[in-house]
Amino acid sequence: MNHYHSSFTEILRHATLIVGGLVIILPFYIMLSYSFKSPHEIESNTGGFFGKQEVMVDEYCVKLGNTRKDCETTPIKFNYGNAFKKAPLLRYLINGIIVTLSIFFIQVLVALPAAYALAKLRWWGRDLVFSMVLFGLLIPVHAIALPLYIMLAKVGLINTYAALIVPWTISVFGIFLMHQFFKTVPDDLVDAARLDGMSEFSIVWRVMLPTAIPALLAFAIFSVVAHWNDYFWPRIVITGNHDLFTPPLGLREFRGGADGSDWGPLMATATVIVTPLIVAFLLAQKKFIEGITLSGMK
Amino acid sequence: MPEATLSTVSRTSPSRNLMGKRPLFGQQHQTAAMWLSAPAIILMLVLLVIPILVAVFLSFTSYGLGGSMEWVGLENYKRIFSHSSYQKMLSSTLTYVLIVVPISTLLGLGAALLINSLRFGKDIYKTIYFLPVMASLLAMAIVWEFTLHPTIGVINDTLQQGCNSVFWYPFLSGEWYGNNPATSWYGESCNSNFPLWFGDKNYAIWTISFIGIWQSFGFNMMLYLAGLTSVQRELYNAAEMDGVNSAWSRFHLVTWPMLGPTTVFVITITMIRSFQIFDTVEAITHGGPAKSTYMMLYAIYEKSVQQNIIGLGSAITVLFLLMVMGLTVLQRWFIDRKVHYS
């Protein structure tokens, strides 16, 4: 009896979670599905998930003076082809990689030595600096975007890579996180390195860094995901120079000019932008969950 | 000197090792520490402290890039609290936060409890529910915009088809329990039109909030799942010995109090994040219709970057900062003294 009862509740739980899961999946399904379909299938909501992939004619290609025969294509090729042709999507993706990686490397370069000094050295001013770090944790960078924007405008850095990167170079959260981690590293390890004649500088990079790899990996995921997906800051400091667009900016620009026939390519662009992180997440779920919920330790 | 020789030396001379146990003193430590933390200190000053001072200063002026600067005192703040469009900004931001935070927290808790109690299939749900957290909110906002599109959107299309169905129409319009279908929400929509989810001021804030909840509750679920693993088995056993048998009292007496710190954290982080809503508003509604989705961060962007009214934007920035920082301080205070189960 009890057994049947618990199986029933188990089924009920699954049913509830499946309904919730469908709502979660819906936009992903739509995005992927539309990226495969022809404009006609999108407008009439037909063709199932994958579309019929019937041969269609690219009207824009005909306008360019090609014969209709030459302009025949399938919806999937049309959508993804246009995503990369009509907008320089590849350029946006490369920008995204440049910006996210630069941010992460500079954050580590700045935060790691500071965290070491705060956790392992005794010096005048340490408490003051640490309270500055704690104070910094209170401020979301997006909230001070306006003064940062003005300062960057004053030094003429608007519409440069630097503008995309500079405000994020200091991660007080990174300092705090590494500080907490370094606290757990035994002092003996540091002392032994000093005895070996290593300078404080090389202790940071050759002794502390290797011990901190797992924490750094989690921080890397945290940082890269946040900045790959960030839209607010790039929107503010990049005002029209397409060569500097990050993936979300590029997608937004595409959306701005999209008319009926562009929905397929628009969804293809969205798919291309969203896929890298989703795939990485599916491959290394534990690490990603750890990294993203890191802010949970603040 | 090469490392290898040095480490041999230290290993073979214990006396040095003993001396080395004591940390470096004075000048040496001081200089090294200053050098190591100098970049961080400078960047913190330039990128965190100075901007706040700049914002506070500019909020008392009528500054615009390339224009003149005049001291206007509290004028900008007065405008925010007296002008109807800024009052709408404050109220729609608060409305958004007050819709998203409780629902997203409860859904996160609910999903975590359900998943935690499953016998199989836990991981697949965790993965699915976490997907929106990973995806670019801007991209997904655009996808939602199409999903909820009045003519080609799947949602309205499906709802429309249900109007002619002998099963769905009575079901959704409430006819099956004796409601008059023509006066129900569904029946009326069938007769006229289904809502413009983003274009109707009665719906827009709810639709935007829905996207916010959709995107954020998987994150809360993960935090709750982590919190649940720290609730010890023994507590449940002890409770059972004390006669706690129903699932509800188990939750009420053991799980919920043990999740106190997690809940405080979930609520504050969701609040801080929902205060910062921007992507969905900028991409879809532009603050409209009738300013019903005019959020603070979007207002800062619109006033300052698009219209170059920086004094006013700075005043909004200062208010925004006070709110978010206040929340974080409150959170720390709560975690430190209130929710400690002992």
Image (cartoon, coloured by chain):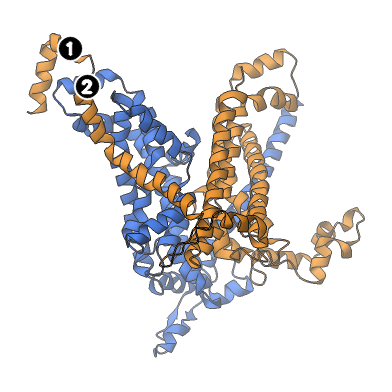
Chain colours: A blue, B orange
- Quarter of the image where one finds residue B76: bottom right
Residue A188 higher or lower than A172, as above or below:
above
Residue at 28 percent across and 25 percent down: it is A123
Mark number displayed over residue A98: none
Dot 2 falls on which chain?
Answer: B
Residue A8 higher or lower than B127, as above or below:
above
User: With B34 as the anchor, is A39 left or right in this view?
Assistant: right
Dot 1 falls on which chain?
Answer: B
Label 2: few (<14), some (14–19) or many (≥20) C-alpha neighbours in 10 Å = few
Residue A250 higher or lower than A204, as above or below:
below
Which of the image's four quarters has the N terminus of chain A? Answer: top right
Residue A127, can we see it? Answer: yes
Amino acid carrying label 1: it is Met
Residue at 39 percent across and 48 percent down: it is A224
Q: Earlier in the sequence, mark 1 or mark 2?
A: 1
The residue wearing badge 2 is B26
Residue at 66 percent across and 66 percent down: it is B289
Amino acid carrying label 2: it is Gly
Residue B125, can we see it? Answer: no
Residue B318 at what x, y percent from top left? Answer: 53, 49
The residue wearing badge 1 is B19
Residue B342 at what x, y percent from top left? Answer: 61, 16
User: With A156 as the anchor, is A285 left or right in this view?
Assistant: right
